[in-house]
């Protein structure tokens, strides 16, 4: 079944999961749009690594394609597209917040605790010996919450995209952790969905910037009138 | 050699090691920074000459200074020496490990900091007060971060005694790769940078009033008092590097008192702290000093990393 010893796989999955959580928290702590995109790329790369480890450790070969898609699309293609958008619209300005960084980080710490307690209650209802990857569930729930938090409190259109993508990474990770990933057709569907969504959102950001000369979402309220 | 004589010999060896290597480590950091700036830089042994020169110079004390001003250098130096006795450097357990655990170490640091901050206020200079208030506001964030990082290691080992933490870890090397452990290491690394007044937080090389924290408090010191304070802060750096290297990667540390084991332990210790010192120098050279109001955000990252480390310990288990 496994090529490498299972406990090694478990340890590596733990390390990558911790790295994913750290990138999510670092995104919250950063001020520049470029960092947001780079950290997201790093996060997706670690996610792809976890998926590959699930393939190696548990012999779930159908994840292999999803793992490569994660690295190719989320860690390489999407960051490139978003970086291009930033270069085109020439906003290198700092991100604006509705909650400052210190308070955001504390809230994120709270969210991690919350997601851990939720995940523990889900896992404790499971019967039998839990595989190593199921421990990642609390990290994935935390990522969904942090992604939502980024969308709620960071006031740039591009940060909304990164928040959405972080949430999507969380969903993928939770799929991996509970059922070794969703069926391939669902994964591929989500990938194309996300990819098209980001491309359209990128164009949107570009148009928003052209019309309003800002990508701060506060200004979007003007559309109502 | 498990007797009073051995305890004395090993303890003095450890003290002398930290005392003697402290200026060298800060010399290595200065040299590396100079190299990054494409300067030749002073020799790595220059800090020894600086200390020797300061020890010979006369002491000038402000007429308004109180007794605090005179005892603080000795107090800071002595408290750092006690910490140097408690932190495992080349051998674990350290002979006098029963004196105190990690909480003692944290509060000995706090004791030194308290007196230095008081002295900043004592002479009534504007810079001193500014430095003290900055130091205290920085300390209020890094102390909890440091505690959380160290408690992560303590929870893993099931003890707050530094020697036991190090001994447990060196007997189970796989635990070094535990993600909680790695996170706590990065948290403690940021704490080290802040505690020893290194670049993103403080700049040890300038006396610019906008940025200085530690230097502002000790601005009034001269002669042997300044030498003692400088030496103590160099030792503090070595102690922190020892904590970082031995609490998280206790490779090669001696577990017996045989001369051969001590020799290997010393070699391993020096390799580790020199590598860490160079990393500190690289961080200093590649980062700009943060604006003072940004410093709490940076330190908050250390706090959150240590906090996540502790949480991950319970999520993933060690």
Image: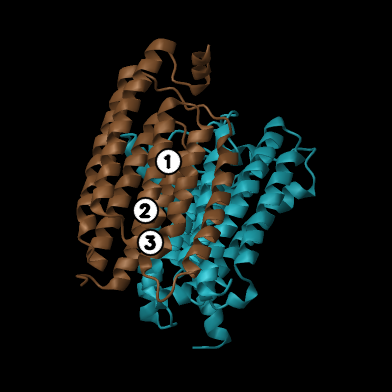
Q: Quadrant of the N terminus of chain A?
A: bottom left
Q: How much space separates mark 2 and mark 1, taking CA atoms?
A: 36 Å
Q: Secondary structure at mark 1?
A: helix
Question: Where residue B165 sits in the image (x, y, percent)?
Answer: 51, 72
- Chain in brown in the render: A
Q: For mark 1, what is the residue?
A: B284
Is there one chain holding both mark 2 and mark 3? yes
Is residue B12 among the parts visible in the rendering?
no
- Chain in cyan in the render: B
* Mark 2 belongs to chain: A
* Mark 1 belongs to chain: B
Q: For mark 3, what is the residue?
A: A178
Question: Where residue B261 sits in the image (x, y, percent)?
Answer: 38, 79
Comparing labels 1 and 3, the label whose residue is closer to the camera: 3
* Mark 3 belongs to chain: A
Disc ID at residue A173: 2
State the residue at coordinates (36%, 70%): A131
């Amino acid at each position: 079944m496994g090529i490498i010893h299972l406990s090694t796989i478990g340890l590596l999955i733990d390390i990558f999961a911790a790295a994913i959580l750290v990138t999510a928290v670092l995104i919250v702590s950063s001020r520049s749009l470029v960092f947001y995109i780079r950290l997201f790329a790093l996060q997706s790369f670690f996610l792809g690594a976890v998926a590959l480890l699930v393939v190696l450790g548990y012999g779930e070969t159908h994840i292999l394609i999803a793992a490569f898609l994660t690295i190719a699309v989320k860690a390489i293609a999407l960051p490139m597209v978003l970086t291009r958008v930033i270069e085109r619209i020439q906003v290198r300005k700092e991100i604006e917040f509705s909650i400052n960084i210190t308070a955001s980080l504390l809230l994120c710490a709270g969210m991690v605790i919350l997601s851990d307690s939720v995940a523990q209650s889900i896992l404790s209802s499971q019967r039998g010996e839990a595989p190593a990857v199921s421990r990642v569930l609390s990290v994935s729930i935390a990522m969904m919450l942090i992604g939502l938090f980024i969308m709620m409190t960071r006031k740039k259109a591009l940060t909304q995209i990164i928040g959405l993508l972080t949430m999507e990474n969380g969903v993928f990770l939770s799929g991996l952790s509970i059922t070794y990933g969703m069926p391939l057709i669902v994964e591929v569907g989500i990938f194309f969905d996300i990819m098209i969504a980001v491309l359209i959102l990128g164009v949107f950001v570009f148009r928003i910037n052209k019309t309003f000369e800002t990508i701060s979402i506060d200004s979007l309220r003007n559309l109502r009138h | 050699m498990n007797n009073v004589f051995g305890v004395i010999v090993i303890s003095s060896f450890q003290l002398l090691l930290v005392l003697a290597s402290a200026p060298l480590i800060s010399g290595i950091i200065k040299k590396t920074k100079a190299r990054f700036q494409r300067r030749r830089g002073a020799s790595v042994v220059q800090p020894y000459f600086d200390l020797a020169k300061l020890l010979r110079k006369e002491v000038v004390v402000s007429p308004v200074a109180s007794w605090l001003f005179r005892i603080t250098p000795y107090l800071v130096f002595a408290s750092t020496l006690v910490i140097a006795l408690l932190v495992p450097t080349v051998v674990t357990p350290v002979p006098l490990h029963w004196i105190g655990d990690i909480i003692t170490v944290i509060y000995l640091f706090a004791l030194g900091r308290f007196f230095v901050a008081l002295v900043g206020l004592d002479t009534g200079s504007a810079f001193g007060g500014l430095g003290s208030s900055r130091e205290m506001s920085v300390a209020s964030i890094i102390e909890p971060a440091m505690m959380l990082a160290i408690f992560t290691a303590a929870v893993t080992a099931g003890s707050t005694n530094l020697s036991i933490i190090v001994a447990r870890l060196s007997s189970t090397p796989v635990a070094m790769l535990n993600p909680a452990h790695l996170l706590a290491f990065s948290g403690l690394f940021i704490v080290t940078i802040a505690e020893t007044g290194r670049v993103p937080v403080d700049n040890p090389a300038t006396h610019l009033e906008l940025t200085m924290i530690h230097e502002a408090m000790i601005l009034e010191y001269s002669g042997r008092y300044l030498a003692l304070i400088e030496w103590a802060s160099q030792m503090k750096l070595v102690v922190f590097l020892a904590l970082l290297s031995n609490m998280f990667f206790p490779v090669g540390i001696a577990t017996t008192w045989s001369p051969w084991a001590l020799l290997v332990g010393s070699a391993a210790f020096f390799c580790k702290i020199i590598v860490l010192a160079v990393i500190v120098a690289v961080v200093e050279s590649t980062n700009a000093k943060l604006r003072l109001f940004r410093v709490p955000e940076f330190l908050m990252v250390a706090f959150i990393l240590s906090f996540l480390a502790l949480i991950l310990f319970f999520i993933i288990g060690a």
